[in-house]
């Protein structure tokens, strides 16, 4: 059995292989809170801006990362190489803000609405990642490359297929963020409600 590793940040991942039957698997999903300070919505949001996960040139409210490894088995069959086993292990981590202290009434209720909406947003990114892994399975399990008795060519063929799947997942995430974060979008509305509240 060979293992390959793939790390991602709501986006990028290469690895995978196809066999006869799809493996039963389930993603492990966990939250990793980062602590923020403040007792008003505006203070909490300012703290997110100072302490949130880095994203490009600035910081994000929340972040979805993943680690993907594959257990793969290649078999030589009549001079061809066949990928007969491809079992993924997927760990998705959602980084979300968490107030350091309990919040006063009014602020607490607004915070709950805000963080619930942000969590749901990140879970959509998680769904995109899980869908990508399933697509990788379908695109590679049972893959057969002729005249490849040492199973070297098959890796090049798989990399080409996986590049397109990874690119599709990244674009879906970017498109989703654009809709949610632009003026009037869901996350934008949540931010306004938090900052303009008590």
Image (tube, rainbow, N blue to C red):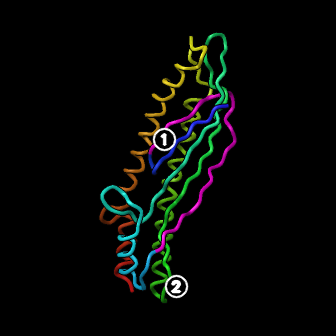
| Position of 145 relative to 95 (above/below) | above
Quarter of the image with the C terminus is bottom left
Quarter of the image with the N terminus is top right
Secondary structure category for the residue under label 2: loop
The x, y position of residue 48, in whole percent, is: 39, 71
* Residue found 61% across the figure and 29% down from its top: 18
Helix, strand or loop for the magenta stretch, by majority = loop
The x, y position of residue 155, in whole percent, is: 52, 25
Residue neighbourhood size for the residue with mark 2, other residues' Cα within 10 Å, grouped as few (<14), some (14–19), many (≥20): few
* 21 drawn magenta: yes
The span shown in magenta is 12-35
Q: Residue 37 vs residue 1: left or right?
A: left
Residue neighbourhood size for the residue with mark 1, other residues' Cα within 10 Å, grouped as few (<14), some (14–19), many (≥20): many
Q: Residue 142 vs residue 197: left or right?
A: right
Give the mark nearer the N terminus: 1 vs 2.
1
* 180 drawn magenta: no
* Residue found 50% across the figure and 55% down from its top: 124
The x, y position of residue 82, in whole percent, is: 63, 21
Residue 102, label in figure: 2
Residue 13, label in figure: 1
| Position of 56 relative to 16 (above/below) | below
* Residue found 34% across the figure and 81% down from its top: 196
In the image shown, does 188 or 62 lie closer to the viewer? 62
Q: How far apart are marks 1 and 2 (CA)?
A: 38 Å
Q: Residue 92 vs residue 114: left or right?
A: right
| Position of 11 relative to 76 (above/below) | below
Secondary structure category for the residue under label 1: loop
| Position of 67 relative to 45 (above/below) | above
């Amino acid at each position: 059995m060979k293992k390959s590793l793939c790390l991602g940040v709501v986006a990028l991942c290469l690895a995978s292989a196809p066999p006869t039957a799809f493996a039963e698997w389930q993603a492990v999903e966990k939250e990793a809170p980062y602590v923020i300070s403040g007792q008003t919505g505006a203070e909490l949001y300012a703290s997110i801006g100072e302490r949130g996960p880095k994203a490009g040139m600035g910081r994000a409210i929340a972040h979805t990362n993943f680690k993907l490894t594959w257990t793969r088995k290649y078999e030589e069959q009549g001079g061809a190489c066949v990928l007969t086993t491809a079992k993924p292990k997927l760990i998705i981590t959602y980084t979300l803000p968490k107030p350091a202290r309990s919040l006063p009434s009014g602020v607490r209720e607004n915070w709950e609405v805000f963080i619930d909406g942000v969590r749901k947003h990140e879970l959509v990114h998680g769904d995109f990642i899980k869908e990508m892994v399933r697509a990788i399975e379908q695109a590679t399990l049972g893959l057969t490359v002729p005249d490849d008795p040492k199973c070297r060519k098959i890796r090049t063929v798989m990399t080409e297929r996986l590049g397109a799947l990874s690119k599709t997942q990244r674009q879906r995430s970017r498109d989703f963020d654009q809709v949610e974060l632009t003026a009037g979008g869901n996350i934008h509305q949540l931010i306004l409600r938090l900052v303009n509240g008590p």
